[in-house]
Image: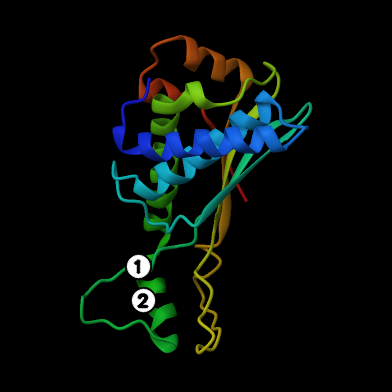
Amino acid sequence: MVNNSKYLIAFCLMLVTSGLWAQSNSKFSPLQRDIEITRVTLENFLKKWDGEPLLNSIQQATGAYKAGAGVEFNIEAPNSRIFLDGRIAWSSHKDKTLMDTFYDAEIVNLQKNRLKMSISKFLEDFSSYLPQIKPNEMVSFVFNVKDLPAKKTEQPDTSPNQNLRTYQITFSLSGADLETIKSSEMSRNEIENSIKTATK
């Protein structure tokens, strides 16, 4: 059940767009439709997520299905530039120092926990939107995390802690678990416990 009315307008526009796309695409299928609905809803949800402020700047999401494997949503989620003081001006020689100061191991772990929390909340509110997949297939949410690219006027730089905050984290659950979430009143904590996490 949808609990977030702020997504309804975007969702309605998305349905109209999906309908027009379906009429012009002879290969359109309910699976493709549901992937696109989920992708757009997920992207908007993450950009507006305010449950616990994300330490990421959500850019875009893509979604694709592979038979036997399932559905994978890839989210570009670079690290946010944290303003420790309103008077600080970001510049090429200060960026890495500030990022190194803020994104220590503890903050990166907090970042990962908040990303998982946002996905469990998304599943709690929007699981009915997700495509129907086989019980042994997986639905995966892959976050690609790294620093924002340097501006054209800035010289790219490296720092000792850049690798710490550059990673890919995947939250996944089986088609069987997804059906359980859809068909029962699971708490967010129960949903979160059913999500598998992998980092590389």
Crowd around label 2: few <14 · some 14–19 · many ≥20 (10 Å): some
> From what the image shows, is residue 69 above or below residue 40?
above
> From what the image shows, is residue 86 above or below residue 11?
below
Q: Position of residue 169 (x, y in %)?
A: 56, 47
Q: Position of residue 174 (x, y in %)?
A: 62, 23
Residue lying at 72% horizontally and 31% vertically, measured from the top left: 28
Comparing 7 with 153, the one in front is 7
Is any atom of residue 194 visible in this view? no
Name the mark on residue 155: none
**Residue contact between numbered discs 1 and 2, judged by CB atoms under 8 Å:** yes
Q: Amino acid at mark 2?
A: Leu
Res 96 quadrant in image: bottom left
Q: Amino acid at mark 1?
A: Phe
Residue under label 2, please give it: 98
Q: Position of residue 112 (x, y in %)?
A: 45, 47
In the image, 91: left or right of 127? left
Name the mark on residue 102: 1
